Image (cartoon, helix red, strand yellow):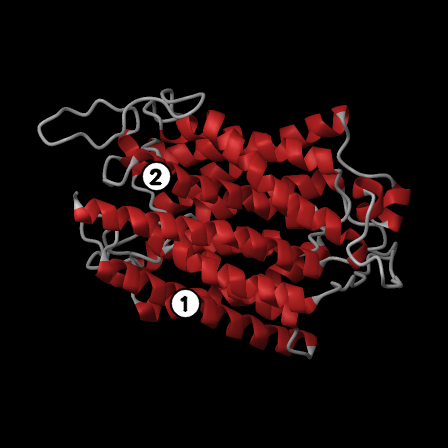
Amino acid sequence: MDWKIALDTVWVLVAAMLVFFMNLGFALVESGFARAKNTVNIISKNFVVFAVATLAFLIVGWGLMYGDGNGFMGLKGLFFIGGADNSPAVGEAYSGVYSALNWTGVPLLAKFFFQLVFAGTAATIVSGAVAERIKYVSFIVFSAILVAFIYPIVGHWIWGGGWLAQLGFWDFAGSTVVHSVGAWAALAGVLVLGPRIGKYGKDGSVRAIPGHNMTSAMTGCLILWFGWFGFNPGSTMAADPEAISRIIVTTNVAAAAGALAATAIAWWLLGKPDIGMTINGALAGLVGITASCAFVSVESSLIIGAIAGAMVVYGVLALDKFKLDDPVGAIAVHGMGGIFGTLAVGLFAQDKFMPGTTGDGLLFGGGAGLLMNQLIGIAAVGAAVFAASLAIWYAIKLTIGVRVSEEEEMEGLDIGEHGNRAYPDFVMTETIA
């Protein structure tokens, strides 16, 4: 037995299981930030989306993302995992179809499962932004298309050896590949859906619709924080002691800095240390460090996390000014955090941490070349995902519809979509529809 491969495989699978556990975190955050009458709908979406993502990625998405092909998409290994593993025995020539993952020696199915949980995360991000008014079946259809086609094609550009990878674009664990993709898809959905009833007054005023369970939201945030200790260091795809130790610390420091920065900014702007902003600040810090976690120092991770945490407060407030109703702040967290986190590679990367990869960023004497590559990648992925998602959302709207009826939205999606309630023994009162 090759003990290194065995150890690497165990590490990758454990990390993947931590990322899988993040599904629970998303469900708790999103349901906590929403109203009680929509709890069953939200937890059901978060439950079923991973099942949908599993089949969509297995059957189509995996091959499009990692199969050998051209700079735009994979063309081999489609329709279930096909072809030999990409780790040839000593003395044998490469005969597989997934050369983009040839750098790691763990078994093919370990690679697949690790990448699958990332694909599921991208789809889950959309759920919170479109909460409390989307048809259940429409969300399922969109999620399947996102994971089968949109996510893997742009993912191929970066992680599958495509044109952005060839350009010199770097995203270690997915600030763009996972988080920005989810956010752009969510933004398109919010535009097509429109705001919840009662969210914005006729005079343009913003009416707060409080979440029903901050305990749930905080618990979910801590689960996500915990899951990120698989998300980021697991992307080494190897049990490299020095690398995974540094990445866990940069990840944790960024989350802490994001939480504190968002709390401080919210306290200053709103007059109170809002728990929702604290939660989203921690998540923004985590999203912000995801692209650069392997390439930056601990000191840089503190700055990256703090900036991302501060940005998310302004982002949430800006979305309301533009009448973009995102009940959980997912677009600000994953969109703004993802964009800044990707740019942070171009600013804060230091070649000494992973020699021969990014080189030094602008702030460490490397010039603006890396930063420009990051900007190109952000723009290309954003434009492609937003345009494709907008087209799909409109197609769904014109066929099966995207939004529940006004009566169902007022009553709550739990009854209209699922025929039950999360809290049947409690009498609920609603001050806002």
Residue found 18% across the figure and 48% down from its top: 3
Q: From the viewer's side, name the closer residue of 10 and 335.
A: 10
- Looking at the rendered structure, the secondary structure element under dot 1 is helix
Q: What residue would you read off at disc 2?
A: 111
Sequence-wise, which precedes: disc 2 or disc 1? 2
Would you say 7 lies left or right of 24 here? Answer: left
- Position of residue 428 relative to residue 358, above or below, is below
Q: Where, by quadrant of the figure, is residue 83 drawn?
A: top left
Task: Judge whether residue 350 can be spotted in this image.
Answer: no
Q: From the viewer's side, name the closer residue of 401 and 296.
A: 401
Residue kind at label 2, given as amino acid type: Lys
- Locate the C terminus by quadrant: bottom right
Which of the labelled discs sits on residue 225, or is there none? none
Q: Where, by quadrant of the figure, is residue 207 drawn?
A: bottom right
Residue 53: x %, y % from top left: 54, 36
Residue kind at label 1, given as amino acid type: Asn
Residue found 75% across the figure and 24% down from its top: 399
Task: Judge whether residue 254 can be spotted in this image.
Answer: yes
Residue 84: x %, y % from top left: 27, 24
Please rate how many residues cluster around mark 1, counting C-alpha atoms within 10 Å: few if below 14, some from 14 to 19, many from 20. Answer: many
Q: CA distance from mark 2 to mark 1?
A: 25 Å
Residue 16: x %, y % from top left: 41, 48
Q: Nearer the viewer, mark 2 or mark 1?
A: 2
Residue found 22% across the figure and 62% down from its top: 242
Which of the labelled discs sits on residue 252, or is there none? 1
- Looking at the rendered structure, the secondary structure element under dot 2 is helix
